[in-house]
Image (cartoon, helix red, strand yellow):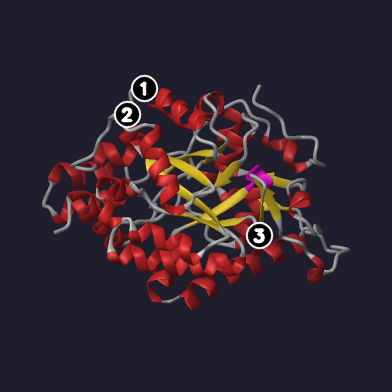
C-alpha cells in the first residue's frame, strides 16, 4: 500500500504529464536577452568545445537534467532512463526528493538504480529544507548521499509549494541554521536549490555565508508548482487549495533575473533552471552568470517513452547551444561567458530598480561582472 508521500509523488508525475502546469503570465525573462550577432564568427563550428568543469568533474557540456521524481514505479523508469542517457552523453542529473525512501527503505530502488545506470555521471542527491526544520540532520543527509553515491547534495527550498499544498509543511524557521549543519558536515558539495520561484541576491548571500557550495536558482517562468498543487486540490475538491494555487500560479522571480542577481552577489557557482527550453536559453543563462544549466520539464515526457527520446531531446538542446556559440563567435564555454549581451524590457527594469548594472554586459570583455552596489 502506498504511503501518503509516495502517493503525492505519483500525483505530481501524472499532473506534470497530463496538465498544463507552465507559468501563465510571468516569463523567464530570456525574451529580454539578446546576443550581439557576429556576421564574421571567425571560428570553425566543428571545433567548438562545450566541455566545462565544476567540483572537479568534467562535463561534456554545461548541462544537467534537473531533479524531478523518485519513490514510485514510474519514477524508477524515469530516473533510470535519464541516467542511461546522461552517462552516455557525459553530463549530469539530479534525483527528486529522497524523503520517501529515507522514510521507507523499501522504496530506495527507484533511486539506487540511477547510479547503477550512470556509474561515472555527476549525480545530485536531494532532501528538503522543511524536513531539516522538523528534525532531520546530517544522518539523513548521509543516507540520501549514500543511496546514490552522490557527487553533491541538493537541499531543495519549496516554500511556495508547501504553503499551498493541503498537507504542506510551511515551516522554514531556522532553516538556514540547519542548512549550515549539512553544508559544513558533509564531505561533498551542498547545493541550495529553489523549485520554481527563484532566489534573490539577499538569500544567495545568506546561503553562501553558511557554506553552500552552489546555488540552483530555479526561477519562475517554467513549471509552476503552485499550478501542480492547484490540480491536486481540484481533484480533491479542495476549494481553498484551488484558490491558493490559482492566485500564486505565477509567483516568483523570473529565471533570467534570478541568475543575474545571484551570480552578481556571490562567488559560488550558479546553476540555472526554471523554464529553460532551448540551447539558446542555456547560452543566455551562461552569459548571465550560470556555471551549469539544468532542464527538467522538456525531458519528463520523453523519459516515460524511451532512452532514445531523451537522447534526441538532449542532443537537440546541445546542438542549439553550439549554434548559439558559433553565431556569437566563441568556441569555448569560458569565452561564451564573456560575450556581450543586451538586456532590455522588464528584465532590465527589474535589475536597475534593484541596484544592478545590466548595461555593463552589453560592453563586457570579461571584466564587467559587477557586484551589486
Q: Which mark is on residue 97?
A: none
At which x and y percent is residue 267? 65, 32
At which x and y percent is residue 25? 40, 49
At which x and y percent is residue 184? 51, 28
Tell me what residue is drawn at x 66 percent, y 62 percent: 321
Mark 1 or mark 2: whose residue is earlier in sequence: 2
Q: Main secondary structure of the magenta part?
A: loop
Quarter of the image that includes the N terminus? bottom left
- Name the residue that disc number 1 marks: 174
Quadrant in the rendering for residue 351: top right
The total number of labels drawn is 3
Q: Are marks 2 and 3 in contact (CB under 8 Å)?
A: no
At which x and y percent is residue 130? 32, 34
Up the image or down, 80 lies above or below 126; here it is below
Start-end of magenta stretch: 287-291
- Could you say whether the residue bearing mark 3 is in a helix, strand or loop? loop
In the displayed structure image, the side of residue 186 where residue 107 appears, left or right: left
> Callout 3 environment at 10 Å: few (<14), some (14 to 19), or many (20+)?
many
- Name the residue that disc number 3 marks: 61
Mark 2 or mark 3: whose residue is earlier in sequence: 3
- Could you say whether the residue bearing mark 2 is in a helix, strand or loop? helix
> Callout 1 environment at 10 Å: few (<14), some (14 to 19), or many (20+)?
few
In the displayed structure image, the side of residue 97 where residue 264 appears, left or right: right
Taking depth in this image into account, of 65 and 150 the one nearest to the observer is: 150
Tell me what residue is drawn at x 28 percent, y 30 percent: 134
Q: How far apart in space, not on screen, are marks 2 and 3 (Cα)?
A: 36 Å
Q: How far apart in space, not on screen, are marks 1 and 3 (Cα)?
A: 37 Å
Could you tell me if residue 157 is visible in this image?
Answer: no
Q: Which mark is on residue 133?
A: 2
Amino acid at each position: 500500500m502506498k504511503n501518503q508521500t509516495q502517493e503525492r509523488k505519483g500525483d505530481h508525475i501524472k499532473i506534470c504529464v497530463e496538465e498544463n502546469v507552465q507559468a501563465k503570465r510571468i516569463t523567464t525573462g530570456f525574451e529580454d536577452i539578446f546576443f550581439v550577432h557576429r556576421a564574421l564568427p571567425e571560428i570553425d563550428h566543428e571545433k567548438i568545445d562545450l566541455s566545462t568543469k565544476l567540483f572537479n568533474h568534467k562535463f561534456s557540456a554545461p548541462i544537467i537534467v534537473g531533479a524531478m521524481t523518485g519513490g514510485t514505479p514510474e519514477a524508477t523508469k524515469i530516473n533510470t532512463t535519464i541516467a542511461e542517457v546522461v552517462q552516455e552523453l557525459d553530463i549530469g542529473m539530479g534525483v527528486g526528493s529522497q524523503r520517501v525512501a529515507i522514510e521507507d527503505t523499501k522504496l530506495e530502488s527507484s533511486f539506487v538504480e540511477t547510479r547503477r545506470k550512470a556509474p561515472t555521471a555527476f549525480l545530485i542527491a536531494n532532501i528538503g529544507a522543511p524536513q531539516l526544520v522538523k528534525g532531520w540532520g546530517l544522518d539523513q543527509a548521509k543516507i540520501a548521499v549514500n543511496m546514490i553515491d552522490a557527487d553533491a547534495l541538493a537541499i531543495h527550498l519549496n516554500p511556495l509549494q508547501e504553503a499551498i499544498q493541503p498537507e504542506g509543511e510551511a515551516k522554514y524557521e531556522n532553516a538556514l541554521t540547519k542548512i549550515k549543519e549539512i553544508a559544513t558536515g558533509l564531505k561533498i558539495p551542498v547545493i541550495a536549490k529553489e523549485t520554481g520561484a527563484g532566489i534573490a541576491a539577499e538569500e544567495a548571500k545568506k546561503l553562501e555565508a553558511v557554506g553552500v557550495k552552489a546555488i540552483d536558482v530555479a526561477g519562475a517562468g517554467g513549471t509552476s508548482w503552485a499550478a501542480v498543487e492547484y490540480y491536486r486540490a481540484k481533484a480533491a475538491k479542495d476549494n481553498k487549495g484551488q484558490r491558493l494555487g490559482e492566485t500564486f500560479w505565477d509567483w516568483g522571480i523570473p529565471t533570467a533575473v534570478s541568475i543575474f542577481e545571484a551570480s552578481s552577489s556571490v562567488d559560488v557557482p550558479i546553476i540555472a533552471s526554471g523554464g529553460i527550453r532551448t540551447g539558446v536559453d542555456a547560452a543566455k543563462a551562461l552569459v548571465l552568470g550560470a556555471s551549469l544549466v539544468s532542464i527538467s520539464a522538456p525531458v519528463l515526457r520523453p523519459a516515460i517513452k524511451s532512452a532514445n527520446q531523451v537522447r534526441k531531446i538532449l542532443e537537440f538542446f546541445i546542438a542549439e547551444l553550439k549554434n548559439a556559440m558559433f553565431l556569437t563567435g566563441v568556441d569555448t564555454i569560458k569565452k561564451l561567458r564573456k560575450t556581450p549581451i543586451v538586456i532590455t524590457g522588464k528584465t532590465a527594469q527589474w535589475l536597475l530598480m534593484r541596484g544592478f548594472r545590466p548595461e555593463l554586459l552589453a560592453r563586457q570583455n570579461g571584466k564587467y561582472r559587477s557586484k551589486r552596489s
